[in-house]
Amino acid sequence: MRVVFMGTPDFAVGTLKALLEAGHEVAAVVTQPDKPKGRGKELLMTPVKAEAVKHDIPVFQPERVRKNEEFLEELKKLAPDVIVVVAFGQILPVSILTLPKYGCVNVHASLLPMYRGAAPLQWVIINGEKVSGVTTMQMDKGLDTGDMLLKEEVAIEPKETYETYHDKLSVVGAQLLIKTLDGLEAGTITPVKQEGDTCYASMISKEELLLDFTKPAVQVRDFIRAMSAVPCAYTLLDGKRMKVYGARVSDRKYSGAPGEIVDTDAFAVMCGDGAVEFTEIQPEGGKRMDIQAYLRGKKPEKGTILGK
């Protein structure tokens, strides 16, 4: 097929690679504009753009695709059979959704209709789900409401983090997309309407990253593993930010107030029900390290209340 690929982050790169390896003609890539990053505010390419440049694929980076007649005309000139969308970051207008012969096909990182929205990977882990997966769907004007094409379940392991589950679903999503395009071209896929229970996986705001120790220890641990990548969950120790990359539920019985450090040797912190033990942290101005390396430098005082 002749494909226009729309995507932005690392999650989308595997699907772009799979399209090329499967022999599809990627006529162009559409991705978000480059953004300044780091102290020097250097403009950095999106991961999808970087991959496209490797293969000399034309790249478009419109500030917006809605009400953009110039961009729409460029798409018409490309005459794609299908537009593949993976974590692009903008809502497509009907004029684009209906342009290709096979429409716009989206790879969504959940088992629709559950976890529609921008952050399904984080929310399935936050909510302690045991299984999620990937759905390919025919996009419509709603937000992740289009007809489902193919699904594949992927188990969420007890120690799964955002990073590990992201990598698994990226591979599964790429393979599922190739199967989907083959099925659409062969006429062997019957689209299925989304019905039944649903929920929305909203983006996690910076304000929500502060750990809430009034919640049960299991929920605190699950939030930490769901936020294991940038920007990461954090707490405050003596007024300074401490990022928390890993934690486990303590098997010891403690008593204390939520947020209280109840064991300095294990860096155990009291929660609403039970306690968590931090396993990997990054103190403000310091480097990411395992908890024992941190404790060899400076142990916090027992009874200290985190989050203040």
Image (tube, helix red, strand yellow):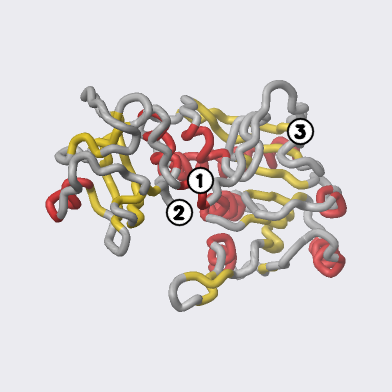
Give amino acid for label 3: Asp
Q: Is residue 275 left or right of residue 229?
A: left
First of labels 3, 1 by sequence position = 3
Residue drawn at x 67%, y 69% as measured from the top left = 58
Q: Which residue is mark 1?
A: 208
Residue 52 picture quarter: bottom right
Which amino acid, by three-letter code, is at mark 2?
Pro
Tell us which disc is closer to us: 2 or 1. Answer: 1
Q: Nearer the viewer, residue 214 or 18?
A: 214
Instruction: Describe the element under mark 2 as helix, strand or loop.
Output: loop
Mark 2 surroundings: few (<14), some (14-19) or many (≥20) residues within 10 A: few
Q: CA distance from mark 2 to mark 3?
A: 33 Å
Q: Label 3 belongs to which residue?
A: 147
Instruction: Find disc 2 in the rendering and name its residue.
Output: 231
Q: Is residue 307 left or right of residue 209?
A: left
Residue 124 in the figure: left or right of residue 273: right
305 or 101: which is nearer to us? 305
Is 29 drawn above or below residue 274 in the view shown? below
Q: Position of residue 108 (x, y in %)?
A: 63, 40
Neighbourhood count class around disc 3 (C-alpha, 10 Å): few under 14, some 14–19, many 20 upward: many
Residue 141 sits in quarter: top right
